[in-house]
Image (spheres, rainbow, N blue to C red):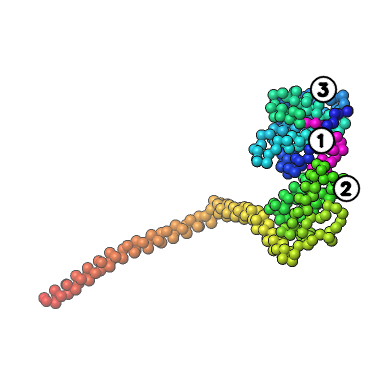
Amino acid sequence: MCCAYDPYEEYEFFKHTGEYAEFEDSVERTEIEDKSTVNCNFITSMYKENVLEDNIPKVINVCKQFIYLTELLINRSKTDKYNADNDYNYLNYWLHDKINKIDSDNICKKSFFQNLVSHNNSNNKLSKLKGKIRDIEKNILDDMNILYILYKNYNEIDKILQGSNSNKENILEYAKNCAVEYEKVKDRCTDDGNKFCETLNTFKKKYEVIDLCNYNIKKWKKRTLPSLIGNHESLLPECSPTENLAQKEVSQKDEKMPQTFQGSPENNMKTITIGTVVTFGIFFIFFILFKFTSFGSCFLSRISKNENVRDHLDEEMNHLPYTSEYEHVNSGNTSYNIAFNSVV
């Protein structure tokens, strides 16, 4: 299908790939429900002659996801750095990427969007994109795909370094991906005025400025990430001995931390479970002994005897003061009687 291509040089939104990737992940994780307010049924009637029948449901799903993603971006809270054009250009790229993975030859994105809006004219969010969705030529889209991969891998590196996970080794795999993609376009940028090259150079500077000496990376002792251009590991600056020592101390702490924090909940749960089982088991054993054996009656009899002995002792102790007092009185009277008899 022959689409009408306009000159297209919109790359600024790639610098915000990390933010857009979060919304994209949300769309991928969410099962989009059929809503009466969303109409993607036009796809079946309008593209059934050009698009394979098995691909029609896939395109319909992209249609629903596109509407959902548009609403997420427009409804989100805006910051001072918010730029609506970045959102629109990202949505234009996203729509191209998803549809081209299904059918890259038979669906013009501009006309697709126009049909989408005409069948969902009550959706104010989609109306904001009027005039923003344009067809992108394949060679330009290929360049955009490379930029997207580069910035997405860079954001994964940054996320790992800034995160609490002590294992930073995964950044090397993302760095390798960056080098592979950068190799495809590194010889294309001789004109600094080219917007694609400006965006590519911005990525390169962000990538090369990362200082790894503050992180514990056992398999990489260089100050910077692996070179984007060829294998020049020997030329990269190394961390100083002081910084290596700091890395070692961090490594030792990290090795202890998982045992303390990650193991504790499991150990605590095991302790609680064992304690509960033991307590219940002891209670159950005593219940059986009391209920069905002579142990219970003997034990109760012994307790009863102990209580009788205690009661008897209490009675004797209570009786002693009275006895002592009685004897004291009698003793006095006896002495008196003896004295009286003596006088007689």
Badge 3, how many Cα within 10 Å: few under 14, some, many 20+? few
Q: In the image, what residue type sits under mark 3?
A: Ser
| Circle nearer the N terminus (1, 2) | 1
Identify which residue is drawn at 70% across, 29% down: 125
The overriding secondary structure of the stretch rendered in magenta is helix
Q: Residue 308's image quarter?
A: bottom left
Numbered circle sitting on residue 8? 1
Left/right of residue 280 with respect to residue 142 in the rendered view: left
- The relative height of residue 325 versus residue 271 in the rendered view (above or below) is below
Mark 2 highlights which residue? 187
Q: What secondary structure is found at the residue carrying circle 2?
A: loop
Count of marks, rendered view? 3
> Residue at label 3?
45
**Quick one: which residue is furthest to the bottom in this view?**
342
Indicate the amino acid at tag 1: Tyr
Q: In the figure, is residue 303 to the left or right of 83?
A: left
Q: Is mark 1 on a helix, strand or loop?
A: loop
Q: Which is closer to the viewer, label 3 or label 1?
A: 1
